[in-house]
Amino acid sequence: MILTRRNLLPAVFAGLAVGCSSPSDPSPVVLSTVSTEDSINLQIMGAPNDPAGYGARASWKLEHGDAKGSIADWDLALKADSNYAQAYEMQAEVLYQLQQFEPCLNKLNECLQRLPDDVPCLLRRAEFAIHLNQFEDAFQWLNRALRINPQLHEAYWMKGKIYEATAANEKALSSYQTAVEVNPSFFDGYITLGVFLAKQQDPLAEEFYRSAAELRPGSIEPLYNLAVFLQDSGRFDDALALYREILAIDPYNATASFNQGFIHLEYLQAYDSAAHWFGEAIVRLPYYHQAFYNRGLALESMGQADAALADYSEALRFKPDYTAAALAKERVLETLGN
């Protein structure tokens, strides 16, 4: 009954945003240093065969929300220089973000036909293979990238995801650990290690969550993951302290309030405190049907049948097919003699 925020895998696999403009890539995208489109146009007029001008305008358009115009300008950059790697990388990135996956894949294939050693395109191509469960192909793309640059933490991270998907857990753990060893600042790598080990109830998960929290002080994700892990491990006081820390950073975090209520209800049988925290969750998220239902349970446990009935009714108002709330409401009505 614990409500998690989302699948807490890094962006690179839940969207696999390895991307063509990762900070570790050997060909970083050069954004425009000029401030207006007119001045970029003057730059292009002065050097029409220089792909950098079209690239600068493509970046300017992307920054100003014109994704299609950006793609068109990267095309112009490629007409000026068919080996201009950034154009392939950025077009693939923009097409991916637009969820135009087939054109993105075509662009990546074009990139690798023209520039077989382009690391960002190799990584993104591996990503596509992983999405299609073509793991052998993905390994080939990743190994090609690693032969070019053995320090690519994203490649080791993706290998870990493949191993985990195929239940090769020891190899997955080794690959994840290699990813953070080659890049000790790889935030998503520490999160992934924490999630991976937490699934196995390995206490080392706490270490990796705390490492992620040190990398990004004030980030909710590692604190929330750690709090849930501690909660699942029976360390309720530590979990409650972390949920309060989350609320100090993000006062509107309804789930941190809900989970405090859940601990007090389910594990501590402190029904008054449970009702309080479920109420705090409702203040932060007024249509939180699970919070209404669980506050109803706390109130019913304290003998406040009328108040519990009201909460069950609210839960059903927001989610009419909420079976648990319907059964609870029927139970209370029977108790009240209605």
Image (cartoon, rainbow, N blue to C red):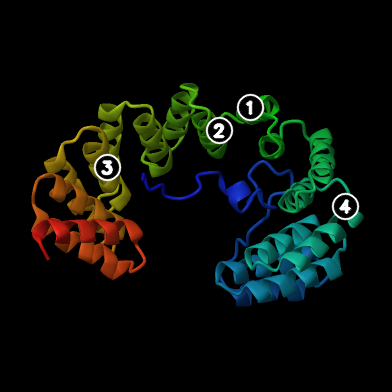
Amino acid type, residue under disc 2 in the picture: Phe
Q: Residue, x 12% and y 56% (percent of image)?
A: 335
Sequence-earlier tag: 4 or 1: 4
Q: Residue at x 61, y 31 (%)?
A: 183
Distance from the alpha carbon under mark 4 to that under mark 1: 32 Å
Residue at screen point 56% across, 72% down: 65
How far is the residue under mark 1 from the one under mark 3?
32 Å
Q: Quadrant of residue 96?
A: bottom right
Which of the pair 15/66 is nearer the observer?
A: 15
Residue at the disc numbered 4: 115
* Distance CA(mark 1)–CA(mark 2): 8 Å
What number is the disc on residue 262?
3
Residue 187 relative to residue 301: left or right: right
Viewer-side residue, 334 vs 165:
334
Pointer 3 or 4: first along the chain = 4
The residue wearing badge 2 is 196
Asked if the residues shown at circle 3 and circle 4 are in contact, with their CB atoms under 8 angstroms apart, the answer is no
Question: Mark 1 touching mark 2, by CB under 8 A?
Answer: yes
- Mark toward the start of the polypeptide (4 vs 2): 4
Task: Say which residue label 1 marks.
Answer: 173
Q: Circle 3 — which element?
A: helix
Q: Nearer the viewer, mark 4 or mark 1?
A: 1
Name the amino acid, label 4.
Answer: Leu
User: CB atoms at circles 4 and 2 under 8 Å apart?
Assistant: no
